[in-house]
Image: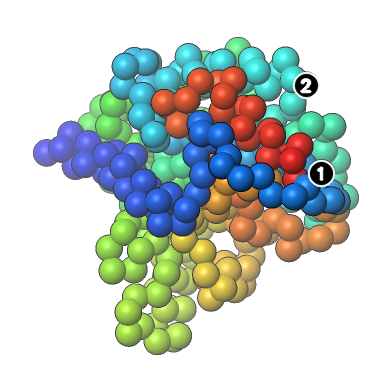
Amino acid sequence: MFRTIRLNKLMLAALLPLVIAAGAGIRSTCAASQTEEPAISRSGVPVPIIMYHSVTLDNDKCGEYVVSLDQIEADINYLKQNNFTPVFMNDLIRYVNYDGELPDKPVVLTFDDGCYNNYEYLFGLLKKENFKASLSVVGSYTIDASESGNEPSAAYSYLRWCDINEMRESGYYEFCNHSYDMHSLDERRGVLKKDGENDAEYQHAMLKDIDGMQRLFEQNCGFKPNTFTYPYGFICPEAEEIVKSLGFEATLGVEEKPNYIVKGDSECLFGLHRYNRSGFCKTENFMKNMLDDYTNG
């Protein structure tokens, strides 16, 4: 029974974002842009943010939201060869809000949903390459994994609190809030309002879920994340207002566009864009298309 539940959730996390990408008209970085927009002058530090999900050791099992460890290693080697330095979301926040510093070419690697394979497969690679990753965890998945008593599997399980603590203490991972139980495409669709839901009902639901997840992090790990990752990238002004009221200093979406980080401008950290790393794409093609967006404006 445990295996069936975990497998269904992993399939949901891997497949349902296709609906969001299609609905939002997000361009895949594996395909060349059909039309080029005029170059726009940008101020601030350019910061590419890559979005990964599940990790596999089998290259034949790659998908739009499943990448192989070999592909991640190739990505990291490409970034190193092109003088990029991995940073956490916390590094961006310190730079903008607390007079911190950033390297010349920062890049953020994010992993959504909290799949156990982000621990089982990725941990050793990050240590070997001295790279960082920002993980966004869904609370209900972590609670189920922590309370099941079953041995976790890289094929279908999610991170437990003990895994999160070990990963964070290593210095190679940081953790973000990905909601407690809003990672779904039911009547709410992520954090969006339900049909017929008034403002008070919506605010109550959001506070209960997102602040509840913050409390779980504090109770089980001794910290509260300062970045919120929108499930499926659904963002609305009402949600941003509530997220800010809870003390979050940055939010992550899924739109594939460049980011420019400006010291002292706290608003530049909200609704940050990310490029989905498809397992169907070669490293060189993915990186070229992503970085060309920065070159072309």
Amino acid at circle 2 = Asn
**Marking on residue 223:** none
Q: Which residue is mark 1?
A: 45
Name the residue located 32 percent from the left edge and 48 percent from the top edge. Answer: 16
**SS class of the residue under badge 2?**
loop
Residue 25 in the image: x percent, y percent?
Answer: 47, 53
**SS class of the residue under badge 1?**
strand
Residue 266 in the image: x percent, y percent?
Answer: 76, 61
Q: Which residue is mark 2?
A: 83
Mark 1 vs mark 2: which is more N-terminal?
1
Occupied quadrant, residue 192:
bottom left
Q: For the N terminus, which image quadrant?
A: top left
In the depicted view, which residue is nearer to us: 216 or 103? 103
Cα distance, mark 1 to mark 2? 15 Å
In the depicted view, which residue is nearer to us: 94 or 237? 237
In the depicted view, which residue is nearer to us: 20 or 150? 20
Q: Can you see residue 287?
A: yes
Q: For the C terminus, which image quadrant?
A: top right
Amino acid at circle 1 = Val
Name the residue located 40 percent from the left edge and 75 percent from the top edge. Answer: 193
Name the residue located 36 percent from the left edge and 24 percent from the top edge. Answer: 62
In the depicted view, which residue is nearer to us: 18 or 263? 18
Name the residue located 36 percent from the left edge and 29 percent from the top edge. Answer: 63
Occupied quadrant, residue 250:
bottom right
- In the picture shown, does residue 40 fall above or below 151? below
Residue 172 in the image: x percent, y percent?
Answer: 61, 28
